[in-house]
Amino acid sequence: MDGNQRATHEPRSPRLTRFGWLASGIVVLLVCGLVRWNWTAEPAAAQAPRAAAKQNPVKQATAIDHTKQTAPVPPQGASVSAPRKNPVAAVVNKEPITREDLADECLLHYGNEVLDSIIHRTLILVSCQRRGITISDEDVNAEIERMAKKFQMGREQWLGVLEKERGITADRYAQDIIWPTLALRELAKDQMQITRRELDEAFESEFGPGVKVRLIAIEDAAKARSIHAQAVADPGSFGALAKNHSQDSNSASAYGLIQPIRRHMGDPNLETAAFALKKNEISQIVKVGNLHVFIKCEEHLPAIKGIDRAKVEPHLYDAIRERKLRTAANDVFKQLQTEAKVENFFADPTKRNSAPGVAAVINGHQISIRELAEECLVRYGDDVLEGTINRKMIDQALKKKNIQVGDADLQAEIERAAVAMNKVDAAGKPDVAGWIEHITANEGVSKDVYIRDEVWPSAALKKLVGNSVQVTPEDLERGYEANYGPKIRCRAIVLNNHRRAQEIWDQCREALAKERQDKVSGYAVKVFGDLAAEHSMEVSSRSLRGEVPPIQKFGGQPVLEKEAFTLTEESPLSGILQVGGAYVILFYEGQTKPVAANFEEVKKLLLADIQEKKLRLAMARTFDELRDKSHVDNFLTGEIRTAKKAAPGTPDATISPGTPTPRVLKR
């Protein structure tokens, strides 16, 4: 993104900030997630027993590495001396960042998440050792090969996709996903027997007859009876009733249409009702969970002919095994938790003083804070180090100019952020408490992390820039057009991968074509909102189903502005726009009318607005200059970044003033 776009540092998720304070880490799922080995699987954190000495890189990943062990072997386990590590993680302009300091930084950001996974891993590991269960390197590699074939890929291609798309390295995939999956499978194998009847039912649910239906689901019983009566009186209105009243939003957007109901797939009462219906008949109300459900039969679908059962049965077997494994492993893990005594001191600040230096105790075995910090470093060190390096560069610049960033500066920056995001009280003053609550609840970070990673860098750069920003008459003219001229109302989806962006764009275009073919007004924007809520990587746009503030001219994002002002009702879908490292898709919803305002009357407001915008641009330039002038030795990655020499006479970047850039479109 150009200088104009980089400059606007509105508070946002630390995982999206341009400084890289936080990495896009992998969220640890509930324990049942430990057993998922498909695309949704996330690290469960377990390490396998050490195997033979000659191992390839993936095999090595499955062995207990005593240099970074976080699932401690019980005391009877053999000890292995750890190789000496470099005590320095990086050197920034001859000033070191120690490994211990970096570990503490990682601990601050990921301590609770990683400790949970350590506890889970330890319970699984100890249970395996007690029962004499060993998962070998060969077992792990065979499972990786199987998973690659499942997705019709070669092993290396599969591992590459995992790292590129999910940020899961080969060794982490082996020890944190595959090993615990296999371990839990062994622990739960007594519950994993698959019968012929189960295979028969799976075959019938996959290839047997089905019923194409529309569905309405309503929680309130009285309302369900009322809507049911309307549907029975006028079956042709069923789709419209589903769209307007069904609480199953996925099917409501498709006028109640769901995937065909087949036997042995879900609620047996609903299946029985579906197969008993004739075309266009409406079922009685069936209670499914807390919902009152009724369906309309569109047509009966015959069984799929010509299926070679011998070829599909292995796939059916795998599907049944995966389903049973999720349930059985969850039961096993609950039993392990019940049998174990776990005290988590790190997660409860009130308990920390009672056990200094101890993160948790599992069945009497202590996990120290230093062990936890080291594991956080192993997992997230590379990403967190980048942010730590950036903080060090800014701190060095402050010391060089003898500038201090105090509590008042931090408070002022928090207030500015609150106002920028419309978090104000009835009197129009910054609602700091409400803003902090919003950040911690929606961004998944603590107040301390937010201030450290977002507020402090912004306040520090503002102090470094000082009073160097000036507003010109041309700036005011452009600011007037940006603020009071027409703006484009649209939704946006922000993605970090072009392939994914292409997939989403294709779905949006298909939805637009379907809307025009079926003459269903609003269908395309509904689909766009669904896709934004599921896939947009920017928190605000995701939570608002793609809604962003209107895009104005001279707002600092020329690529987006140019595209936005070409969109119309006839052509509402933009192309895929590359903005820095992000890919943006827009959907047009209309154009605002110019605001009648006297220039002289609004000049003061414009001046303050443009001053802030140009200040943000100057802050971005200052940060880029610090990076260019710094020499960094990164010992974790082995990278060396040398200071750049600026070419003489290099002009400043052109500044396009205007209102602060919509948060969703900044990167």
Image (tube, rainbow, N blue to C red):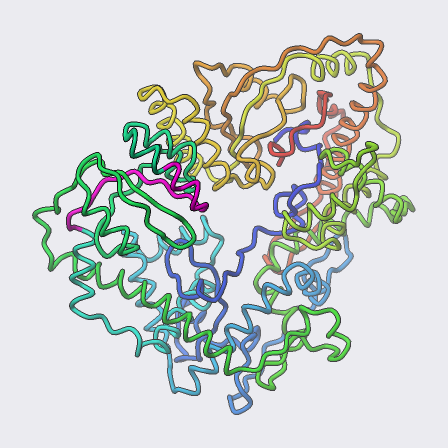
Q: Picture coordinates of residue 579 (x, y %)?
A: 56, 30
Quarter holding the N terminus is top right
Tell me the residue at 51%/89% (across/down).
78
Q: Picture coordinates of residue 183 (x, y %)?
A: 39, 75
Verify whether residue 210 appears in magenta.
yes
As drawn, 123 above or below 563: below
As drawn, 398 above or below 565: below
Residues in magenta, as a range: 207-227
Is residue 363 or residue 39 the one in the foreground? Answer: 363
As drawn, 70 above or below 636: below
As drawn, 241 above or below 12: above
Q: Point out the residue furthest to the right here.
A: 402
Q: Picture coordinates of residue 64 (x, y %)?
A: 49, 77
Q: Is residue 126 left or right of residue 87?
A: left
Q: Is residue 267 left or right of residue 33?
A: left
Tell me the residue at 69%/77% (across/down).
358
Quarter holding the C terminus is top right
